[in-house]
Image (cartoon, rainbow, N blue to C red):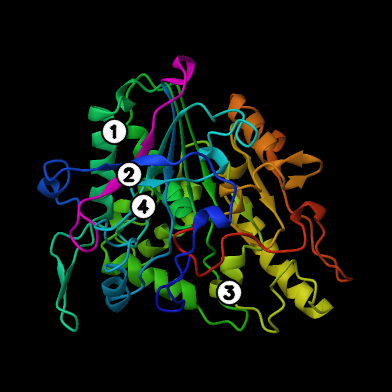
């Protein structure tokens, strides 16, 4: 998850970073499925998704739908650059793709859902599938025509899955996504539910590393809030956020706040299980920007004062969940740890990170199988970093940063 402007393009091989599942083959939307509906990527190319069918009859009507992540473009120049990459154009995307975690077909990593239908919705709009601007934008400096149509892209993908790939017979559906795709999960869960058939008896969401804070830098500059406010307005995202939030802020100058996870989460009616670090490595480098540069490894070189500041940020993430009514409602839950990581649950940390002796995958599985149990049964919260070395209070975090490097958007 990263800004194209702030970080260089380093499209690293995913397999070198994570233990993943078998690759899913590509499905390209036709002109009738996409262009005819105005559902196109930043550069005007047709969307794609990756789809693997359930591998046994018992799982034929069970689905994991996963939003691909990969940052945002924060302004028109950013979007022009992104439109020449696989995150703004599908002209040169790979013929297959793979993720781990809830998208894994390895029952050792993903015992509950390994055999299900798996879909990865490719991300090519730069605004977490939220934009819907009718008129294209002409970027004069590069003579590029840009399309802000992420919401239409989402609709076209879901329509194709429903009509061509048997989503219309689904009975159980997990909606998930990582990084910017995790934010997409918060924004669109309620809407996706309305698109699914009446045969769906269980629909829940598990956003992964998508709870990006509406938070200033350590020095007090509202850098990331201002960037995302511009994204919201630039892409006309009012119809691509949780509609409960949009309705609550209708006509308000503060409606842009609905593009933030804590606002859309608070209004969502979909049962959710966030997979989240309270000290997310991408947020450290791009939102909070703590002084001293000790947010690396697992904080081994931090001073007591720096630890105090980091614990304050972690506490604000927990508070952002707990100020809502939603977090304590029956059927809710989550796994929020203190590891310095980003989308680690998308790979081989899904079955290794633990809180109170319970791994992330086991906590998630218990939540999925429950029905409207008290939320207190299904929340795991982070410990506070210690002011004495080695500082990391959760030994399952290991010694190195987990998940994806901040500048590798293809990994996210």
**In the drawing, what numbered circle is on residue 285?**
3
The foreground one among 405 and 157 is: 405
Which secondary structure is most common in the magenta stretch?
Answer: loop
The residue beneath circle 2 is 49
**In the drawing, what numbered circle is on residue 161?**
1
Q: CA distance from mark 3 to mark 1?
A: 37 Å
Upstream in sequence: badge 2 or badge 1: 2
Which structural element holds mark 1? helix
- Check whether the beta carbons of the residues at disc 1 and disc 4 lie within 8 A of each other: no
Q: From the viewer's perspective, is the residue at label 2 or at label 1 nearer?
A: 2
Q: Estimate how packed mark 4 is, as few (under 14), some (14 to 19) or many (20 or more) residues with alpha carbons within 10 Å.
A: many
Q: CA distance from mark 4 to mark 3?
A: 25 Å
Upstream in sequence: badge 2 or badge 4: 2
Vertical side of 397 occupied by 213: above or below:
below
Which structural element holds mark 2? strand
Q: From the viewer's perspective, is the residue at label 1 or at label 4 nearer?
A: 1
Q: Estimate how packed mark 1 is, as few (under 14), some (14 to 19) or many (20 or more) residues with alpha carbons within 10 Å.
A: some
Upstream in sequence: badge 1 or badge 4: 1
Q: CA distance from mark 1 to mark 4?
A: 22 Å
What is the span of residues highlighted in magenta in the rendered image?
40-60
**Residue shown at 13% from the left, 49% from the top:** 35
**Residue shown at 20% from the left, 51% from the top:** 46
**In the drawing, what numbered circle is on residue 354?**
none
Which structural element holds mark 4? loop
The residue beneath circle 4 is 241
Q: From the viewer's perspective, is the residue at label 2 or at label 4 nearer?
A: 2
Rendered location of residue 381, percent (x, y): 72, 49
Vertical side of 202 occupied by 4: above or below:
below
């Amino acid at each position: 998850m990263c800004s194209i402007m702030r970080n260089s393009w380093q499209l690293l091989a995913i397999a070198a970073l994570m233990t993943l599942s078998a690759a899913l083959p590509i499905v390209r939307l036709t002109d009738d499925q996409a262009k005819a509906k105005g559902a196109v990527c930043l550069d005007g190319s047709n969307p794609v998704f990756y789809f693997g069918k359930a591998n046994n009859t018992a799982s034929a009507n069970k689905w994991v739908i996963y939003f691909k992540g990969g940052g945002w473009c924060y302004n028109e120049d950013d979007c022009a650059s992104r439109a020449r990459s696989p995150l703004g154009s599908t002209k040169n995307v790979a013929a297959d793709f793979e993720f781990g975690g809830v998208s894994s077909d390895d029952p050792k990593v993903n015992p509950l859902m390994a055999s299900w239908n798996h879909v990865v919705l490719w991300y090519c709009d730069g605004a977490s599938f939220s934009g819907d601007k009718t008129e294209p934008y002409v970027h004069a400096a590069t003579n590029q025509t840009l399309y802000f149509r992420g919401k239409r892209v989402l609709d076209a993908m879901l329509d194709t899955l429903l009509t061509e790939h048997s989503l219309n017979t689904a009975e159980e559906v997990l909606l998930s996504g990582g990084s910017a795709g995790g934010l997409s999960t918060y924004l669109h869960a309620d809407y996706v539910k309305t698109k699914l058939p009446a045969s769906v008896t269980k629909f829940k969401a598990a956003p992964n590393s998508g709870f990006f804070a509406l938070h200033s830098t350590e020095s007090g500059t509202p850098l990331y809030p201002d960037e995302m406010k511009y994204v919201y307005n630039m892409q006309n995202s009012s119809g691509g956020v949780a509609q409960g939030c949009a309705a609550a802020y209708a006509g308000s100058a503060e409606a842009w706040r609905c593009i933030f996870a804590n606002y859309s989460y608070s209004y969502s009616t979909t049962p959710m299980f966030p997979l989240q670090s309270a000290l997310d490595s991408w947020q450290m480098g791009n939102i909070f920007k703590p002084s001293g540069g000790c947010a690396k490894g697992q904080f081994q070189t931090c001073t007591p004062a720096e630890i105090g500041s980091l614990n304050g940020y972690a506490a604000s993430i927990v508070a952002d969940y707990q100020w809502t009514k939603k977090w304590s409602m029956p059927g809710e839950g989550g796994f929020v740890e203190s590891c310095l990581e980003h989308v680690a649950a998308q790979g081989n940390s899904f079955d290794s990170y633990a809180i109170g002796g319970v791994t992330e995958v086991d906590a998630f599985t218990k939540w999925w199988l429950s029905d409207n149990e008290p939320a207190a049964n299904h929340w795991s919260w982070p410990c506070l970093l210690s002011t004495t070395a080695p500082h990391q209070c959760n030994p399952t975090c290991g010694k190195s940063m987990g998940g994806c490097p901040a500048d590798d958007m293809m990994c996210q």
